[in-house]
Image (cartoon, rainbow, N blue to C red):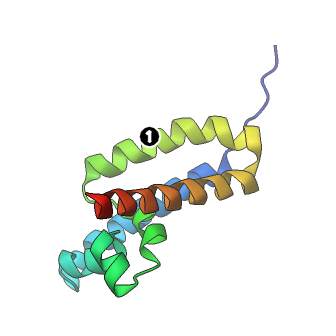
Amino acid sequence: MRFMKVDYTYTKVIIAINIAIFFLFYVLAFFLFDTGQIFRWFALTPSILVNEYFIWTPITSMFLHTLPIHLFFNMISLFFIGRFVEPLIGRKRFLQVFFICGIFAGLLHVAISIMT
């Protein structure tokens, strides 16, 4: 019985980018900035998004993880889901779904935060 080689390159690339940004965040926090400023500019904070128009934060927050355990479980989930979904729907569509879902989740978080 022969097995087909499953290609999930974009999943691996997204995981690598997340890990690189995680380490970059800690290097910047240690040497250059305090973490509050990094979070202010890149985390999705509903009041900052709405009042100060930090419109990039729904995207940047998709790559920002606060603790190693947070990064680990998000990347493990992405690995197991991505290696199944990416070959199924294709690379381009997988990337589109990844960003649409991430942005939608961020905006839903903002909407719920504003309503409560």
Residue 7 in view in this figure: no
- Asked which secondary structure carries label 1, the reply is helix
* Residue drawn 53% across the image and 35% down it: 80
* Residue drawn 32% across the image and 83% down it: 51
**Residue type of the residue flagged with mark 1:** Ile
Question: Where is mark 1, residue-wise?
Answer: 76
32 left or right, relative to 93? left
| Residue 10 screen position, x and y as percent | 64, 54
* Residue drawn 62% across the image and 38% down it: 83
Location of the C terminus (image quadrant): bottom left
Q: Is residue 25 above or below residue 81?
A: below
- Within 10 Å of disc 1 (Cα), the crowding (few <14, some 14-19, many 20+) is few
| Residue 8 screen position, x and y as percent | 67, 45
Q: Is residue 73 above or below residue 57?
A: above
Location of the N terminus (image quadrant): top right
* Residue drawn 34% across the image and 66% down it: 23
View extreme (top): residue: 1
Q: Nearer the viewer, residue 33 or 42?
A: 42
Can you tell which quarter of the image residue 20 is in? bottom left
Q: Is residue 105 above or below residue 85?
A: below
Can you tell which quarter of the image residue 84 is in? top right
| Residue 113 screen position, x and y as percent | 29, 60
| Residue 24 screen position, x and y as percent | 35, 72
View extreme (front): residue: 115
| Number of numbered labels in the structure image | 1
Residue 20 in view in this figure: yes
Q: Nearer the viewer, residue 72 or 53?
A: 53
Q: Nearer the viewer, residue 74 or 57?
A: 57
